Image (cartoon, grey):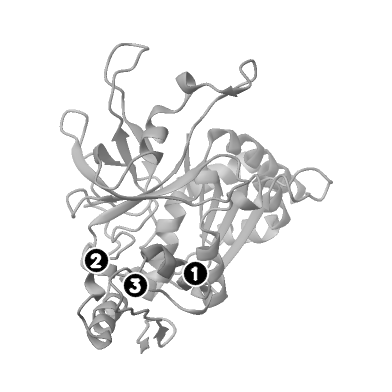
């Protein structure tokens, strides 16, 4: 079935229909995954398929892809004066509800990372690039007080993964500690909030604060400018919101965007790549507006024969990056704070090789608000 698409003229959508009431959602999802790269999306609603015709089901699903995502926009859409910040705090937390928790890394990944969809029913709106805080239940043994909030970058657009504006998503890596003396993980030192979220079940309630932050917002007033995004691990989260807003949804910014969105992702091994199929699909669909490069430290080598880290991948394209930044591009960094020193050292070395005073250049980019950093 085909429906109009704002960038490519039409969307090819596959509808899977079964009259069997025992149809398994997992089986259908697995079947669709086999050819998901050939289509633009799919909708499966087992509870709504029974006793309905294929035509009515197709009509309902088609409407999701045909609708514009424009009902949560500012006027004009680039006006940031109304960005919600810290609407909810520890004294008045918002109560969200877990919709789903899904492991999104392979069996050989270094740790477990989950994609968690949270229902808020438009009660806790946010913008792409912001964070939500989650307060895990329980008392901290360190101070005998309730646990504090843990901030997580939001991994979806303001419209959520279902395009309704009722949900938001988090990308969470389960934090564990391996004790070499025990030869096992020490549960006393595990990350309280990350384990709480990764173990959550649909329907579980979450106490949440925020949304927080304005440093990572998109430069929507200048849709002709390039966006360069650098992430390690779950630092990919805000960029998923960016890229879905530009390439997946039918938003005013997507209509106007004429720049290049360039994603750099650093992970340990192939199984640890996050949302890899989404990025590959975007690259295939929008080759002129999206680039995707990754550094896999345990599998790739840099030009000197050492491990390939994200700073090494940036160095490969340094001249292009500097040119784009000098033309007004915005550069974003998100991930563990340890990523920044080697990245800054690499960019400084490149600048000096080109006869550029690095300190002055970095100051220039910061003053023009082209430089966005959120590390933890």
Q: Earlier in the sequence, mark 1 or mark 2?
A: 1
**Left or right: 342 as drawn, with respect to 134:** right
The residue pinned by badge 1 equals: 33
In what element is the residue under mark 2? loop
How far apart are the two marked residues, 3 and 1, measured between alpha carbons? 12 Å
Residue drawn at x 42%, y 81% as measured from the top left? 7
Binning the other alpha carbons within 10 Å of mark 3 as few (below 14), some (14 to 19) or many (20 upward) gives some
Secondary structure beneath label 3 = loop
Closer to us: 132 or 83? 132
Where is 343 relative to 61, above or below?
above
Of labels 1 and 2, the one closer to you: 1
At 27% from the left edge and 65% from the top edge, which residue is drawn?
77
Crowding at dot 2, Cα within 10 Å, few <14 / some 14-19 / many 20+, comes out as few
**Picture quarter containing residue 233?**
top right
Residue on which disc 3 sits: 43
CA neighbours of label 1 inside 10 A, class few (<14), some (14 to 19), many (20+): few
Can I make out residue 223 in this image?
no
Q: Earlier in the sequence, mark 3 or mark 2?
A: 3
The residue most toward the top is: 143
């Amino acid at each position: 079935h085909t429906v109009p698409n704002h960038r490519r003229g039409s969307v090819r959508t596959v509808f899977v229909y079964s009259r069997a009431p025992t149809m398994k959602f997992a089986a259908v999802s697995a079947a669709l995954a086999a050819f998901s790269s050939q289509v633009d999306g799919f909708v499966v609603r087992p509870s709504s398929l029974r006793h309905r015709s294929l035509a009515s089901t197709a009509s309902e699903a088609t409407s999701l892809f045909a609708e514009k995502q424009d009902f949560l926009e500012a006027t004009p859409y680039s006006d940031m004066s109304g960005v919600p910040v810290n609407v909810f705090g520890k004294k008045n937390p918002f109560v969200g509800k877990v919709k789903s928790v899904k492991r999104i890394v392979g069996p050989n990944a270094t740790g477990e990372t989950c994609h968690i969809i949270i229902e808020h029913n438009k009660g806790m709106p946010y913008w792409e690039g912001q964070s939500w805080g989650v307060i895990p239940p329980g008392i901290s043994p360190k101070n005998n007080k309730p646990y504090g909030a843990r901030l997580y970058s939001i991994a979806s657009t303001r419209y959520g993964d279902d395009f309704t504006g009722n949900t938001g998503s988090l990308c969470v890596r389960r934090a564990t500690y391996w004790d070499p003396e025990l030869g096992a993980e020490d549960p006393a030192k595990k990350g309280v909030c990350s384990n709480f979220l990764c173990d959550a079940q649909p329907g579980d309630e979450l106490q949440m604060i925020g949304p927080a932050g304005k440093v990572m917002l998109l430069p929507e007033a200048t849709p002709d400018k390039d966006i360069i995004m650098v992430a390690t691990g779950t630092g990919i989260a805000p960029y998923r919101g960016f890229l879905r807003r530009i390439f997946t949804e039918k938003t005013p910014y997507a209509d106007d965007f004429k720049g290049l969105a360039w994603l750099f992702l650093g992970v340990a091994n192939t199984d640890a790549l996050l949302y890899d199929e989404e990025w590959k699909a975007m690259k295939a669909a929008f080759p002129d507006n999206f680039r995707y490069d990754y550094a896999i430290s345990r599998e790739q080598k840099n030009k000197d024969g050492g491990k390939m880290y994200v700073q090494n991948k940036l160095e490969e394209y340094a001249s292009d990056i500097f040119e784009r930044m000098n033309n007004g591009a915005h550069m974003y960094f998100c991930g563990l704070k340890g990523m920044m020193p080697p990245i800054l050292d690499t960019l400084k070395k490149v600048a000096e090789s080109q006869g550029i005073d690095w300190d002055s250049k970095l100051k220039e980019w910061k003053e023009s608000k082209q430089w966005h950093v959120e590390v933890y």
